[in-house]
Image (cartoon, rainbow, N blue to C red):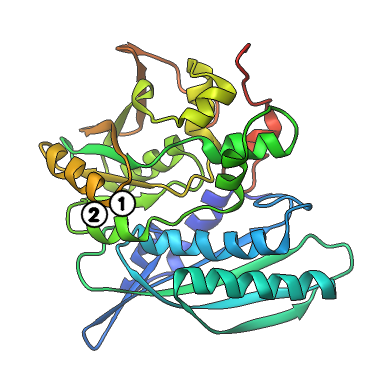
Amino acid sequence: MIAESEFIAALRRLATHPAARGLLDDTAVLEIGGTILVITHDMIVEGVHFLPGDSPADVAWKLVAVNLSDLAAKGARPIGILVGYGLSDTEWDLAFVDGLGAALAAFDIALLGGDTVAAPAGAPRTLGLTALGEATGPVPSRAGAKAGDELWVTGMIGDAGAGLHILTGEVEGGAHLVERYRRPAPRLAAGQALAPLASAMMDVSDGLLIDAHRIAAASGVRVEIDLGLIPLSPACIDALGESRIVRLAAATSGDDYELLFSVAEGQGDALLGLAETLDLPFTRVGRFIAGSGIGLTDAGEDIQLPSRLGYEHGQERISRKRRFPTQSS
């Protein structure tokens, strides 16, 4: 199977409209008559993004939330969605509709349309969603980071990865971590507040390391990350500890849907004040310098990058490659 990055590279020659941003971003940005539309489309697949035993309501929530997370990373206000759905089991399908309604109500957005097909018997459920949003100010891309900028992240990293491994029986932990995997929280308010300040921004879907590397590559700079600064929640630490191997797993496990953003040096006080207003932690985790690639340190020591920075479609999921570390690892 072709790797995701190779396929997107092949598509780039077709994406010539300025709104496509060269396929170097997570959304299209289309200006029509003074209105800035932000458009994204994400898919989720059973066995890849959710487990076969997950409830239809949880799957519906995740489908909506991961798309709204892309809008959040552009500072956009959600307007509505279109859903692509493969019909399979009547009871499951109707429960999904109920869950979708609850998600739409929670985020105060409208269902505008979509498409349905009949899925082959036994095929994994594959769901798609297009989300439309409106931006009233700057729409940060992945490509704006500059040498000297700092790298920050909202919230906590690694909770969702730990939650997945609790569900698969690899580790033990609390319900909060499972909830973080099944029902991510798109940082819409934070995205709208950060858009005027951020030189680059995207959400953490595939892992902090791989997504930071994507910002650096799109921006033509090098990113240096301090592993010891990556924020772990008390629930994650209680379940797994906070050793270097735990932090590496957290930084590569993905599904966090926090915002990863660059700002000019010296913005720390303003960011921490904003974080307090939003009641959401912001943490500086690295910096950008001249050059290319990614570097990793811990307690002032240069450390070797893991064999994989995160999850990329077309490769085996990292969580299936090795067991998630425990306190005794």
Task: Classify the position of the C terminus by image quarter.
Answer: top right
Report the side of 79 relative to 11 (left or right): left
**Which residue corresponds to mark 1?**
201
Looking at the picture, does residue 97 appear above or below residue 282? below
Looking at the picture, does residue 241 appear above or below residue 132? above
- Please say if the residues under marks 2 and 1 sit with CB atoms less than 8 Å apart: yes
- Kindly tell me whether residue 255 is visible in this rendering: yes
Looking at the rendered structure, the secondary structure element under dot 1 is strand
Residue, x 73% and y 54% (percent of image)? Answer: 54
Looking at the rendered structure, the secondary structure element under dot 2 is helix
Give the class, few, some or many, for how many residues have Cα within 10 Å of label 1's Cα (few <14, many ≥20). many
Q: Quadrant of residue 90?
A: bottom right
Residue, x 68% and y 75% (percent of image)? Answer: 97
The percent coordinates of residue 32 (x first, y second) are 28, 85
The percent coordinates of residue 3 (x first, y second) are 60, 48
- The residue under label 2 is which amino acid type? Leu
The percent coordinates of residue 316 (x first, y second) are 68, 39
**Which residue corresponds to mark 2?**
194
The percent coordinates of residue 89 (x first, y second) are 84, 71
Foreground mark, 2 or 1?
2
Query: Alpha-carbon distance for marks 2 and 1?
Result: 9 Å
Give the class, few, some or many, for how many residues have Cα within 10 Å of label 2's Cα (few <14, many ≥20). many
Residue, x 72% and y 28% (percent of image)? Answer: 170
Q: Residue furthest right?
A: 121
Q: Residue furthest left?
A: 266
- The residue under label 1 is which amino acid type? Met
Q: Residue furthest bottom?
A: 33
Q: Earlier in the sequence, mark 2 or mark 1?
A: 2
